[in-house]
Image (cartoon, rainbow, N blue to C red):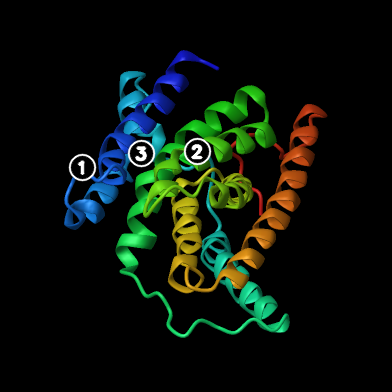
Amino acid sequence: MPGYLLSFFALSFAWTWAFQIPVVLGILQPALAVPMFAVGAVGPSLAAIVVARSRGELRGLFRPGGRVRPHWYVVAASVPPLLLALAAAAALSFGAAPPASWLITPVIGVMVLPAVGEEIGWRGYAYPQLADRYGELKAAVVVGVLWALWHLPTAFLGGADLLGFVPFTIAVVGAGVWLAWLYERAGRSVYVAIIGHAAINARFIALSAWPEAKAAWILLNVALGIACGISLAHHKREQQLGTPGAKPGSTRG
């Protein structure tokens, strides 16, 4: 892996964990937990801006690689809520009772801020750099794994829950492969990835208090990730065979 990408990942983790670990260790007052996690959430995008600027790539960081067709914005915004609905239906079909109360959290804080603070880094910078070197599927999985590990401090909130972090990691990798697929299909538009990420975060509004539906949501993310991974691998083969219209950053609709 090139040194500048290692620098990106190191800076992403360092910035985020520097704000989140003191909260996990109880060094700070509980009232500071939300703002500290919020500031830490911008680590990947901040790292991407710093590294891209040092390499003279800052302008290209925010430009799609091709024309973005409007329907990809719809796909980005609608697929995660559809998975939510399917997960809830699956939980109910197996006899699970819905939670007595739903966890309603601030939309901007849970959905939008992390999406903007992360996606410019994960899919907007790291993924295309890796995809152009090692292939789309491998890049999607690598970024997905690192994306999951970047969340590690959250596993220690309220006490260590490393066992519970395992299914979370699996779901995040699956979601990461879907976001990479979406990013590619939408002409490498980071804005579409941001919308998709924000929609994924919406699950915290509904599923945090419903473990049965949460488990179904994880399985659905895995299935979606596998399907998108097969699509990414197939697209890579098309590129290798020189299939017309299968160029990195081109619009595929």
107 and 131: which is toward the camera:
107
Please, what secondary structure does the residue beneath circle 1 have?
loop
Look at label 3 and name its amino acid: Ser
Q: Where is residue 230 in the image (x, y as percent from the top left)?
A: 77, 45
- All told, the count of numbered labels is 3
Q: Looking at the image, can residue 247 be seen? A: no
Comes first in the chain, label 2 or label 3: 3
* Residue at mark 2: 149
* Residue at mark 3: 45
Instruction: Judge whether 40 appears above or below 56 on screen.
Output: below
Q: Residues within 10 Å of mark 1 (few under 14, many from 20)?
A: few
Residue placed at 65% from the left, 57% from the top?
221
- Label of residue 227 in the image: none
Figure quadrant of residue 139: top right
Figure quadrant of residue 103: bottom left
Comes first in the chain, label 2 or label 1: 1
Look at label 1 and name its amino acid: Ile
Say whether residue 65 is left or right of residue 45: right
* Residue at mark 1: 27
Residue placed at 69% from the left, 84% from the top?
95
Q: What is the spatial separation of the Cα atoms under label 2 and label 3, in whole angstroms?
A: 16 Å
26 and 233: which is toward the camera:
26
* Nearest-to-viewer mark from 2 and 1: 1
219 and 130: which is toward the camera:
219
- Furthest toward the front, the residue is 159
Residue placed at 67% from the left, 32% from the top?
138
Please, what secondary structure does the residue beneath circle 3 have?
helix
* Nearest-to-viewer mark from 3 and 1: 1
Q: What is the spatial separation of the Cα atoms under label 3 and label 1, in whole angstroms?
A: 26 Å
Please, what secondary structure does the residue beneath circle 2 have?
helix
